[in-house]
Every structure is written in structure tokens, then in C-alpha cells.
Amino acid sequence: DAMVIQNPRYQVTQFGKPVTLSCSQTLNHNVMYWYQQKSSQAPKLLFHYYDKDFNNEADTPDNFQSRRPNTSFCFLDIRSPGLGDAAMYLCATTDRQETQYFGPGTRLLVL
Amino acid sequence: AQTVTQSQPEMSVQEAETVTLSCTYDTSENNYYLFWYKQPPSRQMILVIRQEAYKQQNATENRFSVNFQKAAKSFSLKISDSQLGDTAMYFCAFMKHAGTYKYIFGTGTRLKVLA
């Protein structure tokens, strides 16, 4: 059974048009992550939540925001997507042994 | 600050052969976790194997095993009896035992298994 679900799997947006990516997890764990991954590169952490505590990476652009309304769900908002934001966006959560489980990702295309 | 280095950007291996992917890391921590993740082309990142630093015994999962050398800060992955389905990017990752819940990833090794 899927533990981390991401919707949609593919998202096309226009330059400057806000877009929201969603993630849900069934592990009921209190830590969730959002990563950006560009082709053949390691995932780059954008931010993570510990419960409702939001932890932003220092180099995450202000253009990226996140919301976590409850334990199971987390959203990534890109306020004004640029061409450079085209990437795979990965959501992850952890089990109690600190192992991260990743979702299948949402591939974002910016036209 | 911790760093993770994967010095082999690309590797290839013949089907049924054995291959070893290298990973070194730098940390002043004594307790931490190390992981190998596999990301097949256009597919999900999945855990291959994990190692707790306080355990001296090397972790093993079926055809996958690690050679963990704590003093040398080395964490290599050995894949035995390579299969076509092992073709993927492999990422080594480090996490401190307590505190940040954040992974430090290496840059990855692209492994291609040849028929």
C-alpha cells in the first residue's frame, strides 16, 4: 500500500501562474519534507515540518511556500513559477527509525 | 557541517556480476544513520539499505550489502548477482542521530546493468 501519495503526478503551468502540489501520507508520522529534484541531481530539501513547526532551508526562494493543515497532508505552493522551477517535486515522510519514504513525485512543467 | 561524497558519477556492470558503489562522508558526530537509496529511471526513490553507526555489523538485504568503515568514514554498497532491474541512480545519504531529521545526500551514481 502506498505510504506517500502525491497529486498530481504531472502538472503543467504557465510562467507566473500560481500552482499547488499536494502530498498525503499514511504513516501518521510527524515529519514531512518537500524536495526539489532536477534531472540526474540529488534531491534538494526545500523545507520540512516537525508537527506544525515549519523549517525553511536558508536557500529556499520566497516563491516557495508550504502548508500543513493536519498530520496527513502537506501542500507546496509556488507563487510565481519561473522556467527554472521546472523540476520533479518529491514529498517524503519518516518512520520512527528515521528512514525517509518518498512519494512518486510531481513533475512540474512551466511554459 | 556534514558532507557526503560519491566519487563515481557513472558505472556499468554485466548482468549477474558484482559491483561496488563508493560513498564517503565527513562528520564529527558519533551517532548517525547512513542510507542507500535507489531511483530507477522515471520512478520512485526507494530505500535499499540502512546502517546505524553504532552497529559494527554490516547491514545486508538480500543481494545488497554494505561495507561500513566508521573510522575511515566510508560506506560502500555491494550489489551481487546484478539484475537489469538494478539499473538506477543510487544515492548515499547521511543523517545525524538526533536533532535535524534532515538527510545529507551525495551527488549520486548512475548504474547501468548490461545484458
Image (tube, grey):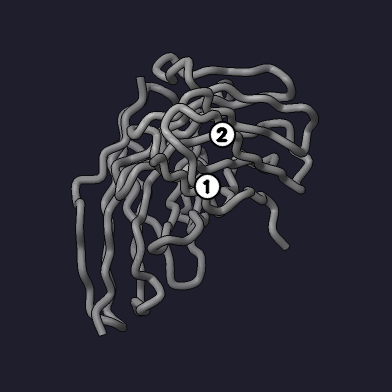
Residue B29 percent location from the top left of the image: 43, 24
Q: Residue at x 40, y 42 (%)?
A: A87
> Which labelled disc corresponds to residue A11?
1
Quadrant of the drawing holding the N terminus of chain A: bottom right
Dot 1: few (<14), some (14–19), or many (≥20) neighbours within 10 Å?
some
Q: Residue at x 59, y 50 (%)?
A: A103
Q: Residue at x 61, y 50 (%)?
A: A8
Identity, as a three-letter code, of the amino acid under mark 2: Val
Tell me which corner region of the image, top left, top right, bottom left or bottom right, holds residue A22.
Answer: top right
Q: Chain of mark 2?
A: A
Secondary structure of residue under mark 1: strand
Identity, as a three-letter code, of the amino acid under mark 1: Gln
B67 up-or-down from B79: above or below: above
> Which labelled disc corresponds to residue A19?
2
B100 up-or-down from B111: above or below: above
Task: Say left or right for A106 vs B26.
Answer: right
Residue B31 percent location from the top left of the image: 50, 30
Q: Upstream in the sequence, badge 2 or badge 1?
A: 1
Q: Chain of mark 1?
A: A
Secondary structure of residue under mark 2: strand
Residue B75 percent location from the top left of the image: 34, 47
